[in-house]
Amino acid sequence: MAEQATKENVVDLLLAQHQEIRQLASTVEKNHGKVRKDAFDRLRRLLAVHETAEEEVVHPFARRAADDGSQVVEARLREENEAKGVLSELEKMDPESAEFEETFARFHKDLDAHASHEEKEEFPRIAQKATPEQMRGMAAAVKAAEAVAPTHPHQGTESPTKNLALGPVAAVADRVRDAIGKARG
């Protein structure tokens, strides 16, 4: 296991997470009841920690990696900000309601587009510019960031500075919220 971790690179890690995100989103869309709710909760948590780690680790490198890196990253940050807002709205809805289904269908489409943009515009630049050591280091940094990231969306924190300033407090609050939710069943 430790050997695999030292060989893993950030692009492979993010691509695997994108695949998991896509699978969870499809599960939410195609199911109802407890299956839908559980899949949505897992999706929401994964998206929250994934986007935080990208904002803290991946986007800053991508911004510096190419001449148009800032433009590419700014477009992704706008998408992430909008997605966090919609995800927050979805959290408050009854997963069985028509409103949830309609909003989630649009969210799912936008989520797929966002992941595709990263995969086509951002990840290739990282893979081209980063050394193998940087790729492995970023993968380790992404995992570390995810371990302490908030587990719910927090719109307006799409920069490394804001994530580092507000993230720890939000992460503790989110994890307490999650524990209370689990205790209630």
Image: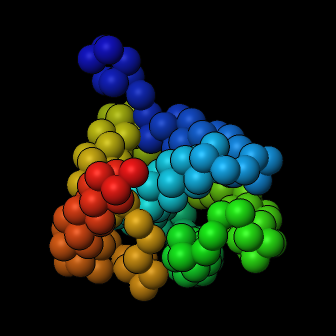
Q: How is the image coloured?
A: rainbow
Q: Is residue 76 above or below residue 147?
A: below
Q: Residue at x 44, y 41 (%)?
A: 10
Q: Residue at x 45, y 81 (%)?
A: 155
Residue 108 pos. (x, y %)? 73, 61
User: Who is closer to the viewer here, 112 or 93?
Assistant: 93
Residue 99 pos. (x, y %)? 76, 76
Q: Residue at x 29, y 52 (%)?
A: 183
What is the tally of numbered marks visible in this picture? 0
The residue at the far bottom in this view is 156
Q: Is residue 130 above or below residue 16?
A: below
Write down the quadrant of residue 176 in the picture.
bottom left
Q: Quadrant of the N terminus?
A: top left
In the image, taking residue 83 as reference, residue 41 lies left or right, namely: left
Residue 93 pos. (x, y %)? 61, 74
Q: Is residue 157 at least partly visible in the picture?
A: yes
Q: Residue at x 41, y 77 (%)?
A: 154
In the image, taking residue 130 as reference, residue 84 lies left or right, namely: right
Q: Is residue 71 above or below residue 31?
A: below
